Amino acid sequence: MDRLVYAAMTGARASLGQMAITANNLANASTPGFREQIAAFRAVPMGGDGANTRAFTLDTTPGSNFQAAAFQSTGNPFDVAIQGDGFFVVRRQDGIEALTRAGNFRTNASGELVTASGLLVLGDAGPITIPPNSSQPQIGEDGTVAVFDGTSPQPQIVGRLRMVKPDLKSLSRAGDGLFEVNGALAQGSDASLAAKQGFVEGSNVNVAAAMVALVSQQRLFDLNVKMIQNADANARAANGLMTLSRG
């Protein structure tokens, strides 16, 4: 009976993990630039004498769906969407660089361009600062950020958004939802990418499909729990029969 319990237990654990990931996807269905997380599992045989029929259910490396999402027009000059398979580069509080598709930017008290969570948005030459008392920024397709400061009829270029195009297979999702490159991130802007001002990219989570998956995963979890309960009932019945035979 322990073989059935073990198989059902690992299956229930995997289903529970899938439900957590699907629930997180649903929670971020309206988060700008969010990429759907994909859960995958594999069976690993358990070593040991007499254990050839048992197997672990282990998580594989979590994946992400990098399919582009729809652009939403906002009219906000600080909102930027990337056309192409690229990412904006941001800097965390600890100085480590990370990648994001969320282009709903703003400025902080120092005039620096930051993400919605306050992380610095990096340009080709570092952080981009919007001068005080200047006009709203104008962002070109190549990521150039320009403003009118009132001292010249010509726009003043204050930086250029750093838009990179890494190998998607080299990306891993961090705990804060940002993506990291396995290894140093020393890439410069990719000329094939284009910025679109006044737009923000939505989440690529398909809500209907995620809801269907969540129901299916819940049923699978319930099935595995039922198997554990049945195995326990069978074990109790077998112990009862053994007791009677000894009497």
Image: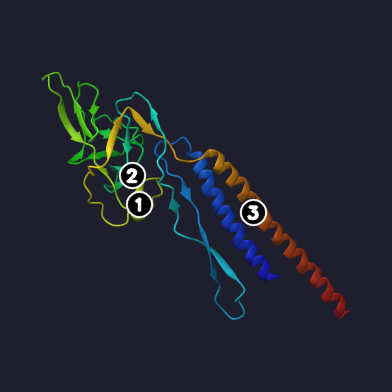
Identify the mark nearer the N-term, 1 or 3.
Answer: 1
Q: Position of residue 73 (x, y in %)?
A: 38, 26
Residue 137: quarter of image: top left
Q: Describe residue 29's horizontal placement relative to residue 180 as left or right.
A: right
Q: Position of residue 75 (x, y in %)?
A: 34, 23
Q: Nearer the viewer, residue 80 or 227?
A: 80
* Residue type for callout 1: Leu
Circle 2 residue: 85
Q: Residue at x 52, y 60 (%)?
A: 41
Distance in Å between CA atoms under marks 3 and 2: 35 Å
For the point 15% across and 24% down, the residue is: 155
Label 3, secondary structure: give it. helix
User: Percent from the top left, x then y, of residue 114?
Assistant: 29, 35
Would you say the residues marked 3 and 2 are in contact, meaning their CB atoms lie under 8 Å apart? no
Q: Nearer the viewer, mark 1 or mark 3?
A: 1
Q: Considering only vertical position in the picture, is 29 above or below 242?
A: above
Instruction: Identify the residue position indicated by label 1 in the image.
Output: 168
The residue under the point 87% across, 75% down is 244
**In this view, the mark in front (3 or 2):** 2
C-alpha separation, residue under disc 2 versus residue under disc 1: 9 Å
Mark closest to the chain's N terminus, 2 or 1: 2
| Crowd tier of the residue under label 1, counting other residues whose Cα lies within 10 Å: few below 14, some 14–19, many 20 or above | few
Q: Is residue 196 left or right of residue 221?
A: left
In this view, 162 is above or below 13? above
Say what amino acid the circle numbered 3 marks.
Leu
Whether tag 2 and tag 1 are in contact, CB under 8 A, the answer is yes
* Left or right: 103 as drawn, with respect to 130: right
Q: Where, quadrant-wise, is the C terminus in this rendering?
A: bottom right
